[in-house]
Amino acid sequence: MRLLKTALVAGALAVLSVTTIASAYAQDTKIGFIVKQPEEPWFQDEWKFADQAAKEKGFTLVKIGAEDGEKLMSAIDNLGAQGAQGFVVCTPDVKLGPGIVAKAAANNLKLMTVDDRLVGADGKPLEDVPHMGISATKIGEAVGQAIIDEIKARGWKMDEVGAIRVSYDQLPTAVDRVEGAISVLKAAGFKAGNIFDAPQAKTDTEAALNAATVVLNAHADIKKWVAFGLNDEAVLGAVRASESVGIPADGMIGVGIGGAESAINEFKKPAATGFVGTVIISPKRHGYETALNMYDWIANNKEPAKLTLTAGALAKRDDYQKVRKDLGIE
Ligand code: FCA
């Protein structure tokens, strides 16, 4: 009995010291979260949820915006110099893949990507780097379906409608998203010849507005339009362009992807605009979960899944609050 008691006490002490060590370790854990476009609400939300994970687990989160390759490379060196153990990144350019992997290794940092997956010199994804992205094709299809449903609800003749494909083809997830939408449009009888490419120089609203304006001016005979792109900003650019050439809100059907503040502000406007909906994706999963995955990798040696693809849910002016709540992002 005495022996048993001693063993129990020793066991309890062991547990205690492991816990103490673990929390001391958490305090020393430093994780970087680098994003390509810090001003975009989606990335602000990702950071917000990553912060939540940091608070819960007691690690330090270092948030860095890196709009180009040079900034990204020095951010990684910087994290190394600060004694960080790993980072999560949404890169400004996926082709930097091998360079990012090498930089991370040189700084002894664990690496995980979010949103935009790194590619190698052959254009194929770097499958060894753990990644969390959206189910791009499926979400694009949901956008296409929402557009078709709205075309029908408005009683438009498919043949008289033009489509603006706001594109950013150097990014594979962007291609998958718009091609998903196009496949549904075509299957519903949308004329392939009426789909026009509007290549944007950057993935923000201004670049999309410029690109979409060119398309609208080149096809001034078309009065009814739909628009899609890789995110809400792309579609908002197309919607703003349509307004600027005098197309009324009921002549435009734009459906975005994201559901962060850019879309919400649009839904809050007193009068409906041509931005009719968005497929809401989860910054909570992409921010909180990736940060937590990185923490578990560092602190508990638990490597993240190589590939996680998250889902989306369509929302419109009248139900976006509920959809956000259901996704746990209110
Ligand atoms: C890409 C886009 C972002 C967001 C994210 C999930 O990084 O640029 O706007 O849609 O994927």
Image (cartoon, grey):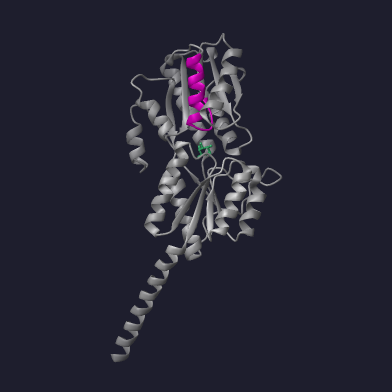
Number of numbered discs present? 0
Nearest the viewer among 264 and 128 is 264
Extreme residue toward the left, this view: 1
Residue 85 is a magenta residue: no
Left/right of residue 303 with respect to residue 269 in the rendered view: right
Q: Residue at x 51, y 18 (%)?
A: 241
Q: Is residue 282 visible?
A: no
> Does 255 appear above or below 21?
above
Quarter that holds the C terminus: top left
> Does 182 appear above or below 118?
above
Image location of residue 27, percent across then percent down = 42, 63
Tell me the quarter of the picture where residue 265 sits.
top left
> Magenta stretch: dominant SS?
helix
Image location of residue 191, percent across then percent down = 58, 18
Left/right of residue 7 with respect to residue 93 in the rendered view: left
Image location of residue 246, percent across then percent down = 48, 11
Q: Residue at x 44, y 57 (%)?
A: 60
Residue 243 is a magenta residue: yes
Q: Residue at x 59, y 20 (%)?
A: 195
Q: Is residue 82 visible?
A: yes
Quarter that holds the N terminus: bottom left
Extreme residue toward the bottom, this view: 2
Which portion, as a residue range, is magenta? 228-244
Tell me the quarter of the picture where residue 149 sits.
top left
Image location of residue 289, percent across then percent down = 44, 51
Extreme residue toward the top, this view: 221
Q: Residue at x 48, y 20 (%)?
A: 240
> Does 33 appear above or below 229?
below
Nearest the viewer among 77 and 227 is 77
Tell me the quarter of the picture where residue 272 sits.
top left
